[in-house]
């Protein structure tokens, strides 16, 4: 059993512990109060500092849009005219191959096997145009622009429908003959052959372009 002295010492220790805990709690409360007051003072100082500042109003988003560059119409017209002028209607074919009524063409320096593959449909037709209803100058520009665009896009095999000339004067396929000369003048063209019946037959031509 504890004697009176030991009991008094124990009670005294507990009392000191409680006092220490109370003092620590009070210190924490005072510290929190000081921080809160300091933040309040800083907020007040900030409000005082910016009280005369006017808010920035952002302009409408449309004002930040870049204005589109003007379309160089004259440049486009000049380029188209250059394409037209580069093809002559009076070109004399020198390397066209005629087998009966079918007309074939193979540029010098290429294997004759290319024509055989072209006629058999070895290359998939990736793009096509139809010249029906166009006059000679319109068709010439259309063909030249079409081939140049296909070359830029990496297209190898195309079909051009020129018609059989049944609706023209003397029922002659005028565009058909001109088209052959135009194609031979285009460096992009490797070969051409009359289309298969299901692709237009004698009214169309399949053209192979350089890779």
Image: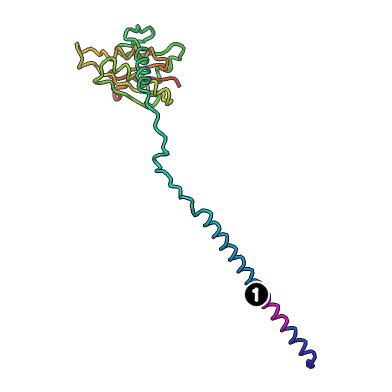
Q: Measured along the vertical axis of the image, is residue 18 above or below residue 149?
A: below
Mark 1 neighbour density, 10 Å: few (under 14) some (14–19) many (20 or more): few
Camera-side residue of 162 and 61: 61
Please identify the quarter of the rendering in which residue 184 is found.
Answer: top left
User: Mark 1 sits on what residue?
Assistant: 26
Q: Main secondary structure of the magenta part?
A: helix
Q: Position of residue 133 (x, y in %)?
A: 24, 20
Q: Residue at x 56, y 58 (%)?
A: 45
Q: Quadrant of the N terminus?
A: bottom right
Quadrant location of the C terminus?
top left
Magenta stretch: includes residue 20: yes
Closer to us: 106 or 145: 145
Q: Residue at x 33, y 18 (%)?
A: 141
Res 193 → quadrant: top left
User: In the visual, does 2 lie left or right of 109?
Assistant: right
Residues 81 and 189: in front is 81
Q: Nearer the viewer, residue 79 or 155?
A: 79
In the image, residue 95 lies in the stretch drawn in magenta: no
| Coordinates of residue 136 in the picture (x, y in percent) | 27, 14
Magenta span covers which residues? 15-26
């Amino acid at each position: 059993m504890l004697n009176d002295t030991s009991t008094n010492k124990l009670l005294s220790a507990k009392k000191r512990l409680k006092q220490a805990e109370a003092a620590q709690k009070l210190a924490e409360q005072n510290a929190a109060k000081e921080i809160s007051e300091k933040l309040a003072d800083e907020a007040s100082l900030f409000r005082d500092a910016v009280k005369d500042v006017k808010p920035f109003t952002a302009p409408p988003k449309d004002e930040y849009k870049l204005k589109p560059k003007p379309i160089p119409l004259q440049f486009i017209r000049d380029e188209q005219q250059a394409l037209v002028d580069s093809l002559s209607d009076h070109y004399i074919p020198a390397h066209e191959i005629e087998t009966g009524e079918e007309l074939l063409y193979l540029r010098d320096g290429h294997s004759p096997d290319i024509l055989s593959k072209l006629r058999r449909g070895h290359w998939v037709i990736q793009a096509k145009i139809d010249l029906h209803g166009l006059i000679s100058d319109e068709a010439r520009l259309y063909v030249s622009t079409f081939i140049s665009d296909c070359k830029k896009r990496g297209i190898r095999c195309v079909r051009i429908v020129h018609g059989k000339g049944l609706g023209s004067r003397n029922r002659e396929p005028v565009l058909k003959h001109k088209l052959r000369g135009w194609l031979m003048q285009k460096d992009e063209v490797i070969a051409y052959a009359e289309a298969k019946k299901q692709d237009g037959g004698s009214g169309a031509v399949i053209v192979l372009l350089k890779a």
